[in-house]
Amino acid sequence: MIRVRGLRKSYGGQLLFRRLDLDISKGEVVVLIGPSGSGKSSFLRCVNGLESFEEGEVTVGGIALHSIRGRSRAEGEAIRRVRLKVGMVFQQFNLFPHMSVIGNIVEAPVRVLGVDRETAAIEARKLLRRINIEGKADSYPGELSGGEQQRVAIARALAMRPEAMLFDEPTSSLDPEMVGEVLSVIRDLVGEGMTTVIATHEMGFAREVADRVVVFDKGEIVETGPPEEIFSHPKTERTRAFLSRVLPG
Amino acid sequence: MGPLTAYFFRDRRIERTLGFASLFLAVVLLLAQAAPVAAGGSLDKITERGYLIWGSDAEGGAPYVFPDPRDPSHLIGFEVDLADAIAKRLGVKARQGQNAWDSLIPALKRGDFDIVMNGIEITPQRKEEVLFSLPYYVYTEQLVVRKDDNTISAIGDLKGKKAGTLSGTVAQEILTKGGGIDVRIYSGQVEPYEDLAIGRIDGVLLDLPIAAYYGKTNPKLRYAGGPIGEGYYGIAIRKGNDDLKAKIDGILAELLRSGELKRIYQKWDLWGPPQEKLTRLYREKTGFVGLEESRKAPLSTFLPALLKGAGITILISSTSMALAISLGLLLTVCRLYGRPPLSTLSTAYIEVYRGTPLLIQLYILYYGLPNIGISLSPVTAAFLGLGMNYAAYEAEIYRAGIIAVPKGQMEAALSLGMSQGLALRRVVLPQALRIATPGVTNDFIALFKDSSLVSVIAMVELTKTYSILAASTLRFFELGLIAAILYFCMSYPLSILARRLEERLKGGGR
Ligand SMILES: Nc1ncnc2c1ncn2[C@@H]1O[C@H](COP(=O)(O)OP(=O)(O)OP(=O)(O)O)[C@@H](O)[C@H]1O
Ligand SMILES: [Mg+2]
């Protein structure tokens, strides 16, 4: 479903990824962990074309993105098609503050996919029921709690019927009591078999939902494997060092 | 929007955004074009049109042309009577065209008027620019000084002293040639005498009719010596309009022969050179209005004229603000999202328009463009001048608004599969415009006041109406208060609106 080959990326001369390879198959749940600044967000952003890269290839559902130098029209079109296949949820929610909850959800289906507004609204209400905030359809993002906002952001991405979902630290800006409600929505999604990539600092959750854990450090993948392996028998020193810092005891 | 814009923009949706902005722009421009167009010129056109447009400056224009103190919406003066007499013999009506005195000839050349008649002295330099009719008045220059200053009795005594006059006059030449005189140039005829009376300058040399009306009437001032020099006022006509000149010459000769010219000048007490007689007699003459009378007229007589000026101010400000708002948006979008030639051009436009004075932009637009064959009507030039200038400022306000929208908004929109243009139009711009609204409203208030600058391009709006009325009545204070109150009544609702918007924005929410 998602295939990354030989990805090279730097920020203004500062090299981040030298050569990155990763494959994620359909229905798989991959959790990215690693210290701050190790490149988890950058990786996710390369996958859906929000960041350009210098070398290598990212393929999503058969559509290939290349090193985006010239940004030709064709390449721009490819990026857009990739974005239609993968939904993205941000740490900062990024809901559109000038639109109601329902407006946020129907905007892209109506404007991008050409779905008529009525149908889109019916779908949107179904999604709101799924995330348990049916009553807030006509509220504005400013009137919602952080947890509610993030759930709406997930619904907004799902409304585009993506084949995969990318989550970039979806619970990092939430108050602790709201983390649970967002995680439970993601848990449901994973349960339905959605291909999912999550960058997170929630180790417990990573252990629970992941099919595979990928450990990032300084722009490199230092280890990858099933959660029990990574958390109970880490093979590399760098993983051990990282885990000893984040796991209590 | 075609392949051209497709080349200039990274994204087709931006074109659509621009499409809306330019459509709005087009409508605004179209409305502006519906405004009256510039006057033509030759004899046939005048007859066809049914009126003769004669250019003059009613500001401080007594006894030539000035607002009737008893009905300030109506102009009087010996040149008004003369224009009526000429028009009547042409079989048409006379209509005055207003412009600043020293811009009358340029305005004539660009076709705003059919003729200019406003104490224009026939000089060799001017003859190179325009045609002149036969003289219609013989003028002399008169030096005026303070009564309590007996050191000056002739031009020669002005050496080392300050003397005032009007720009571009024969009197200015005489003073300059006098040598050693500190010549102060004024643009209105009232101010030099006011400055003389309070001692800012030591003498004023101007044409006798002006000296008689504005100088001699001031109890603090007196004539120094007799009339100097002698010259002719002529009616200026655009070069090439020889048929019009021939016709007007014939009419002037007839007016002189029939005694009608004499009657007009007698009415204004301008017949014959002895200036003592002029001042002694003019209060006895019927139909002649002295300064005293206009000083006493109730303020309400001036209100209709001021309100009309306010109406023009509103018209000019709101149409040019509409232009500024739409053109500014176009500029910002081009600057931030256009490809190099377009983005650089927009940036250049914004920098040039913000970096040069509005006054010069107006002059170039109105008096400069005719040199390359583009002649705009005063309304169009005022609208374009103000609108294009303010567009640069609005563009910067929008840009600040766009920058203030968090980056995540654009990224979230893109990640939903929106194109950059769609994201801009649906997500970023609505938020940016909301942030920009108080700033734009504040600029609208500023534009209201800046609109007074368009009086230099023959627009008589509120400030110009005020200065014309004040100069003829010398009631700068009371009329100034009324004009200021009118401005306040127009801009205060806007500042309340701006404050409301700001508060709403601060309150967050939607
Ligand atoms: N837009 C940018 N410009 C320059 N450098 C950047 C930019 N974005 C990220 N970086 C750098 O790239 C490196 C990887 O950042 P990234 O955000 O991908 O890490 P991360 O693993 O997501 O960290 P965190 O856990 O703190 O979110 C960091 O050193 C960061 O400073
Ligand atoms: Mg991150």
Image (cartoon, grey):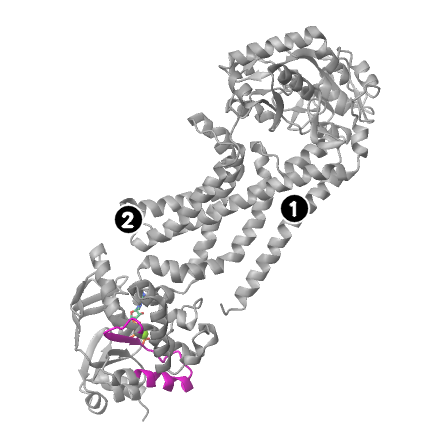
Nearer to me, B398 or B69:
B69
**Label 2 neighbourhood size at 10 Å, few (<14), some (14-19), many (20+)?**
some
Q: Is residue B183 above or below residue B32?
A: above
Return the x and y of residue B160 as percentages of the image width and height: 70, 22
Residue type for callout 2 = Ala
Return the x and y of residue B154 as percentages of the image width and height: 75, 15
In the image, is A4 to the left or to the right of B476? left
Q: Residue at x 74, y 27 (%)?
A: B193
CA–CA distance in space, label 1 to label 2: 45 Å
Q: Residue at x 19, y 91 (%)?
A: A233
Query: What is the secondary structure assignment of the residue under circle 2?
Result: helix
Ligand 1 lies in quarter: bottom left
Query: What is the secondary structure assignment of the residue under circle 1?
Result: helix
Judging by the rendered image, the residue that carries numbered circle 1 is: B487
- Please tell me the numbered disc located at residue B6: 2
Same chain for the residues under marks 1 and 2 in the image: yes
**Can the viewer see residue B435?**
yes
Residue type for callout 1 = Tyr
Q: How many marks?
A: 2
From this viewpoint, which residue is outermost toward the bottom?
A249
Q: Is residue B137 magenta?
A: no
Would you identify the image quadrant in which residue B78 lies? top right
**Magenta-drawn segment:** A159-186
Q: Chain of mark 1?
A: B
Would you identify the image quadrant in which residue A79 lies? bottom left
Q: Is residue B200 above or below residue B243?
A: below
Q: Is residue A171 magenta?
A: yes
**Can the viewer see residue A245?**
no
Q: Residue at x 39, y 83 (%)?
A: A132
Considering only order in the chain, which callout, 2 or 1, is on the residue closer to the N terminus? 2
Q: Is residue B478 above or below residue B59?
A: below
In the image, is A118 to the left or to the right of A47? right
